[in-house]
Image: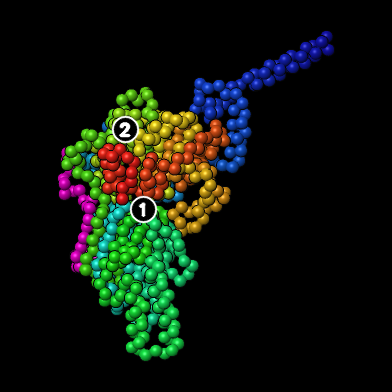
Amino acid sequence: MKKWTGGVLIIGLACILLVSYSFIQKQPQKQSTYEFFHPNEKITNLNSSIQTRDEKLQTSFRRPHLVNVDGLNYLFNSTHLPKEEEGKPFLAWGQMRLLLSRSDSLPETAQGIKEAAVAWKELKSEIDEKRASKFVHKDERNCSYSVSAVNSSTLFSTNGSVILEIPCGLVGDSSITIIAIPDGNQDGFGIEFVGSEGKDDPDPPVILQYNVVLPRDNFTKEPVIVQNAWTDGSGWGKEERCPNHGSPNNALVDGLVKCNVELTRSSMEESSKSKHLSANKSTNGSDLNDHNHVSSNFPFLDGSLFAATIWVGEEGFHATINGRHETSFTYREKLEPWLVSRIRMKGGLHIISALAKGLPVSEDLDMTMDLDDLKAPVIPNKSKRLVLLIGVFSSGNNFERRMALRRSWMKYEAVRAGVVAVRFFIGLHKNKQVNFELWREAQAYQDVQLMPFVDYYSLLTLKTIAICIMGTKILPAKYIMKTDDDAFVRVDEILASLKTKNPDGLLYGMVSLDSKPQRDKDNKWYISTEEWPHDSYPPWAHGPGYVISRDIAKFIVRGHHERNLKLFKLEDVAMGIWIEQFKKHVREVQYHNDERFHNAGCEPNYILAHYQNPRMVLCLWEKLQNEHKPDCCD
């Protein structure tokens, strides 16, 4: 009896184990990324390959955690954000908190958020004040096209320096012209483009320092122009000297040399003759004559009047002295023209006049007769996807550029009919007046999306993700395009080209298949081995304009929400890195290269032309309307 009972017990336990094992085997599998994006499609062998690739990704990329960033709570406090119609510029803003809380944040993220909180608090106070008064006084609009001063007495002076205030920063083609006479009682003088003081940074950044050492009669000092930049966090960068007797720097800035070859040749001749004169113990008279001859090519001389114009290009500052280009200086990281709030002149310099012109100024909305025609059209049926969402990168004080786009390619019929939507993505500015003018513009035209950070170059990647959020969650579109506010886009040709392409896994633009990271620390696009350890990048499309398909955009939004994708500060290369992950985890990618996307200028039969100022943008549109030809403008 006992043996029989023991046998029954053993058999019973075996049955329980068998049933438990079968139940475990039938547990539902966790939904894959591909299934999330394609819920109605049947998945066969893809799951196993995705799972294997996910395991590989986890070993190469450590998922970041969330951190608390100073200012973030204020920026995302719902009681501080406008509601209903006034809240439309904040649609993407409201979905970016997790992205800004990552422990692997981009450079300047914490600074950009902290400064944005201050800027938004000031702007909100300004908005409430103006709303209470019902109207804006015209004399309160102080973003001026130009500012000037005659002689040093009309310029603001402090600590031995002379200051020319710049009301709303600088933009492309802004220029500063100084007419002055060097004072030989001092060794030289300096001209500095200075940013504004931060709340916790009493020493403002120096976006450009232009120091001049004057030639001396006794050859104790060699005449030279020294350019550099400074920030509180990084100190002085690597100085650039002109003339430079070291290894020649053949790099071009906006197509211009960094140092005029005539200046270099003159300096080399002067050095050679100086040594020759010293060896032969020349008389004082001949020494002076020869010195005057060889130093005459240096643009600054003791007691001689000069006119110096420093103007803003796409890639850097350029100095023209007495009508001749002398030097160019590439923008350093974090130091961009829009940051400039004053010009500081110091040292041995008697100033005759100073003029800043081509400064950013917003259009007077009360005088804009075609405002209703330029306002973003209402999307007729939000349940139906747009064909294309175009996200445009812009800076707060680029008022004129945005107006040029509204009066040109944003008037294509597909845009006005709501088939294509165009939105500007703009970070806050450190200047209170710029932010208020930007706010009025956003309310008037309904095509601006404000970003919860200050517009530093290294944070552009966050705008790329915001465009993907807009095109997948807010204004759903079949395709998403990114472009810049100095680009002309032939929307009709983009749409015609997309009709011929498979709408899945698409990257369309000027595709770079073989490029390497820049390892020069002073280069704007410098990437350290910690940021990208590999010798080359995956395929990517140049930033002035490219199109991705909706499935890629959804993959990017989901990947960053779950913090499974890497943040990378070069926004166009970042897109290539994310698409490489899409290729590994979802499906093959169609890389469609089209050389009609011009990333540096314009060529006939273009689809996209870059580096077009407002005048050229309007000219291109006029040519298309009148001549029906995609020809370029000079």
Is the residue 51 above or below the residue 302 in the image?
above
Q: Is residue 207 visible?
A: no
Q: Quickly name the residue at label 1.
A: 314
Q: Which residue is mark 2?
A: 415
Q: Image quadrant of residue 256? A: bottom left
What residue appears at the point 41 percent right and 86 percent down from the top-left corner?
277
Q: Which residues are magenta?
A: 133-158
Q: Is residue 500 left or right of residue 45?
A: left
Residue 359, position in %: x, y? 26, 53
Disc 2 residue type? Val
Q: Nearer the viewer, residue 445 or 138?
A: 445
Q: Secondary structure at mark 1?
A: loop
Q: Residue furthest top?
A: 1
Q: Which residue is at 19% across, 40% downward? A: 368
Using the numbered discs, state the Cα–Cα distance from disc 1 to disc 2 in whole angstroms: 28 Å
Badge 1 crowding class, 10 Å Cα cut-off, few under 14, some 14 to 19, many 20 or more, is some
- Whether residue 135 appears in magenta in the rendering, the answer is yes
Q: Quadrant of the N terminus?
A: top right
Image coordinates for residue 393, horizontal then vertical, percent: 36, 43
- Looking at the image, which residue is at 72% across and 15% down? 15
Q: Tell me residue 408's x, y (percent).
A: 28, 40
Type of the residue with mark 1: Glu
